[in-house]
Amino acid sequence: MILTNTAYISNIQNKAFVCKKGVLTYTQKIPFYLAITVKNRRKELVIEFMGKVLGKRYAELISSQTIKQCFDNINALGICYLDYEKILNDGEVTSCDITTDVDCATIKEMNRFMRNNIRSYRLFDAKLHKNGNLEITKIADTNEAWKKLTVYNKEVEIGKYTNRSFREAYDISPLDFHNKCRFEIRVNSEEQLRQTLGIKSTILKAVLSANVTPIHDFADEVLSPNTQTDITAIQQYRIELILKDCDYDMQKVEATLKDKYAEKTSMTKILNPYREALNRRNHPTEQNKVGWRDKIMGMLVST
């Protein structure tokens, strides 16, 4: 979502817009979502769109290299003209999804690992849905500290019936996203955007030029560190019994154990042997013993 000046919109086709109390609005949902609001009294122009605005270039995602294509495609609709250069240098991003696609042939397995290896379930709420999608939310009292990461199979998502009109309009196939895993962070405020991207200004050009790795950094914050704990046979037996009693769910394990220790005890350290045991149970082969955490960090290191 971009907030900018009404001076940067022209050639408005009034028949395409709805006028209510002096505010002009245009909204479409297919083949891609687009909303334009013109508040002439306040001189505010609000533009909201998603990655599908790129059309045939959708797989490239919105970036400094593709942002002009977004505005070219909007202008091609013939409903108005948006001055790309001025919006790029003067429009403020008020919210956005920071997104990257990585190659992964075992997305559900990776998401199970992430769900079971959260650093602290008191700080992060992790939900693994039946369709294999993972949502990790940073629990916070303020909008600035709140953060949400979604990880899902892009091939499955783009193949949904709700995306049919988009696929047909631009001759896009789900196979174009075969084995593509999408990581997506929702950013809901300008202050959160400044903190996440390490920038002073949320001007569109500054947001697109930020040289940081927010998805990698958030995953690193969320996931428990790699460990190797020496435990006895009887300790291992006790761990297996607790895991079974908690339905092999690490969030339940933490909830069960946290009251058994002093308030300032590091639950991350306490939970490490349980995570290790669960990972061995879920990934028994030598091939799968290559750390998932390291794999995930490697996937995200350059995004």
Image: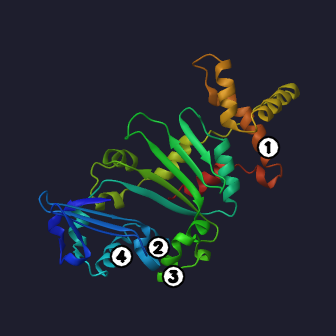
User: Which mark sits nearer the N-terminus, 2 or 3?
Assistant: 2
Amino acid found under the numbered disc labelled 2: Tyr
Residue appearing at x 47%, y 82% in the figure = 169
State the mark number for residue 43.
none
Disc 4 crowd rating (10 Å Cα; few below 14, some 14-19, many 20+) is: some
User: Which mark sits nearer the N-terminus, 4 or 2?
Assistant: 2
Q: Is residue 239 left or right of residue 221?
A: right
Amino acid found under the numbered disc labelled 1: Arg
- Whole-Å distance between the Cαs marked 2 and 1? 39 Å
Amino acid found under the numbered disc labelled 4: Gln
- Whole-Å distance between the Cαs marked 4 and 3? 19 Å
Whether residue 213 appears in this view of the structure is: no
- Whole-Å distance between the Cαs marked 4 and 2? 10 Å
Q: Dividing the picture into quarters, in which one does residue 68 lie?
A: bottom left
Question: According to the image, label 4 marks what residue?
Answer: 69
Secondary-structure class at tag 3: helix
Secondary-structure class at tag 1: helix
Question: According to the image, label 3 marks what residue?
Answer: 168
- Whole-Å distance between the Cαs marked 2 and 3? 13 Å
Q: Dividing the picture into quarters, in which one does residue 146 lie?
A: top left
Residue 41, percent from left and from top? 11, 59
Q: Is residue 267 left or right of residue 58?
A: right
Q: Is residue 116 above or below residue 79?
A: above
Question: According to the image, label 2 marks what residue?
Answer: 58
Disc 2 crowd rating (10 Å Cα; few below 14, some 14-19, many 20+) is: some
User: Which mark sits nearer the N-terminus, 1 or 4?
Assistant: 4
Foreground label between 4 and 3: 3
Question: According to the image, label 1 marks what residue?
Answer: 280
User: Which mark sits nearer the N-terminus, 2 or 1?
Assistant: 2
